[in-house]
Amino acid sequence: MDETRLAILDRLDAGTASGPELAASCGVTRAAIWKHVQSLRDAGFEISVDDEGYRLVETPEYGAAAVILGLDAPYEVRYVERTESTNEVARSLAETGADEVVVLADTQTAGRGRLGRAWSSASGGIYLSVLVRPTLPPGEVSVLTLLAAVAVAQAIEERGGAPTIKWPNDVRLEGKKVSGILTEMEGEADRVSWVIVGIGINANVDSEDLPPGGTSLRSELETDVDRASLVRDVLERFYALQADPRGGLEDWRSRSDTIGRTVRISTHDSDICGEAIDVTYPGHLRVETDSGMVDVHTGDCEYLR
Ligand code: BT5
């Protein structure tokens, strides 16, 4: 959002302010303030004006403006009410050279899971894709999936839930999937060009409308969540966790419901069965099998016990 508009919102968030006061603090004319206030109204902010000045009456419930207000991470946020897949929108932005952009949607018409699977994306959920250009080597990009899962889990904890994480990408409540992550990347053998971390969270949707094994925050917390605040929280945590990915892995381990389980991991060419012992950097599952220790890079994990 335009810097002046953000400054006006910040100031009005603290209380009523007169036109001259806003003009002085933003370094623009009163006429310019008036124009910015009109644009903010167009973006969904209800701003009243009387003898004392401008007053912020209501902020939009959801969308870019609602998320960006008070966001403590350097992302640009773009909102589309409805799109095929936020990962696809982010991909087109990546191709134009964009960086640190978040694409957010209220609903997706062709939401994607891994390996071409579908992601159910009813209105009321959270569907976002973070486009980043990390300095990580390509082989370490998978850690971003784990950090995103930690960010989502921590944000749910903040709202009273007790989530666990199933390797590699499921955040669960009561053993049911409440969030999934799809990380896509482009680069060369030794250099990452861009990474898109797509995060779906079943927020204010009914669990009956989800595929079997899924649940929602509405169903588990028995209340609707403020989606804008939840998105902000996830983005801030995801950004902060990237400063210390190995430390983030520790946060992942402490929430894991995979470590210690007997698992079957289906990879593209084989099934690996054994006991999940640990997750090692950048996110490989270490499995003790009958024929020795195996570090699995990716696959679908099924709990046998
Ligand atoms: C995932 O795949 O869990 C990754 C989901 C990523 C979704 C986000 S939304 C924003 C961004 N844009 C996109 O288009 N995608 C990303 P996977 O591990 O393959 O799990 C997919 C499986 O989970 C499906 O085959 C279903 O069984 C189940 N599933 C589908 N939709 C679900 C939902 N909303 N909640 C819980 N489970 C679901």
Image (cartoon, rainbow, N blue to C red):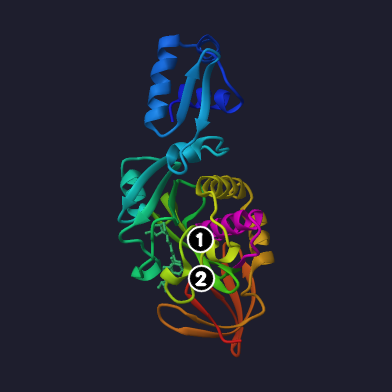
Residue 275's place in the image compared with 116, above or below, is: below
Quarter of the displayed picture in which ligand 1 can be seen? bottom left
Residue at x 62% of width, y 69% of height: 279
Is disc 2 placed on a helix, strand or loop?
Answer: loop
Q: Report the span colored magenta.
A: 140-164
* Mark 2 burial class by Cα count in 10 Å: few <14, some 14-19, many 20+: some
Residue at left offset 46%, top offset 61%: 205
Residue 182 image point, x, y percent: 44, 61
Q: Residue at x 64, y 60 (%)?
A: 249
Closer to the camera in the image, 257 or 65: 65
Residue lying at the far bottom of the rendered structure: 290
Q: Which mark is residue 20?
A: none
Residue 33's x, y, as percent?
Answer: 44, 16
Quadrant (top left/top right/bottom left/bottom right) for the C terminus? bottom right
Task: Name the residue nearer the viewer: 221 or 242.
Answer: 221
Q: Residue at x 55, y 45 (%)?
A: 229
Q: Which mark is residue 297?
A: 2
Of label 1 and label 2, which has the lower sequence position? 1
Estimate the x, y position of residue 118 in percent, counting from the top left. Answer: 35, 68
Q: Position of residue 172 (x, y in %)?
A: 57, 68
Look at the image and tell me in which quarter the N terminus lies. Answer: top left
Q: Are marks 1 and 2 in contact (CB under 8 Å)?
A: yes
Chief secondary structure of the magenta span?
helix
Residue 62 placement: quadrant: top left
The numbered disc on residue 142 is 1
Q: Is residue 17 left or right of residue 107?
A: right
Q: CA distance from mark 1 to mark 2?
A: 9 Å
Residue 159 to residue 259: above or below: above
